[in-house]
Image (cartoon, helix red, strand yellow):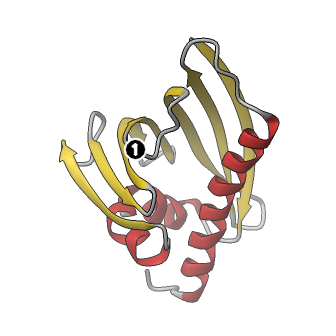
Amino acid sequence: MGVVTQEYATPAAVPPARLFKAMSLDIHNLFPKIVEPIQSIEFTQGDGGAGTIKKLTILEGTLNRHLDEIDAEKFVYNFSIIGGTGLAETLEKIQFESQLVETPNGGSLRKVHVQFFTKGDAKMSEQDLKASQAKVEGLVKLVETFLLANPDY
């Protein structure tokens, strides 16, 4: 098994508390409404704390997400994609560590550290890494747009 690491940060024009609520605490309610490929998110184990497993039904199949760590005070949300038909056959799992920090203008910066655990001697191409980053950054921007349009959320 190999491990490929990726790090990046995505700015957003909303405070960390609002972005954290939408992308971490209420993801199971909000994402099926605003992220077209996500049809549903259901709890299969746990109640939303560390150890919780959620099944995402997406257009391409399913993804199983394990919540590794959550800290609402520090805006930390770490999870792993551990299975499902949407996980590439060349991957054991994908582990995401993310933290939101406040920016001087009152917005957020979402710092992400991703590890792709490959099966055997499988490799991750630069194109695969760029596509993964683009998906995550696109989700942040989608949620940012929703929050700016819905200030009472």
Q: Position of residue 2 (x, y in %)?
A: 62, 14
Q: Which residue is pictured at 29% across the width and 48% down the height?
A: 54
- Locate the N terminus by quadrant: top right
Q: Secondary structure at mark 1?
A: loop
Q: Using a 10 Å C-alpha cutoff, classify the residue at mark 1 as few (fewer than 14 neighbours), some (14 to 19) or many (20 or more).
A: few
Q: Which residue is pictured at 53% across the width and 28% down the height?
A: 91
- Residue hosting label 1: 85
Q: Quadrant of residue 27?
A: bottom left
Q: Position of residue 35 (x, y in %)?
A: 49, 71
Work out whether residue 1 or residue 97 is closer to the camera in this orientation and state it: 1
Q: Is residue 80 left or right of residue 123?
A: left
- Locate the C terminus by quadrant: bottom left
Under mark 1, the amino acid is Thr
Q: Position of residue 26 (x, y in %)?
A: 36, 63
Above or below for 20 versus 14 = above
Q: Of all residues shown, which one is farthest toward the right?
A: 126
Q: Is residue 14 left or right of residue 41?
A: right
Q: Position of residue 23 (x, y in %)?
A: 48, 60
Above or below for 68 versus 143 = above
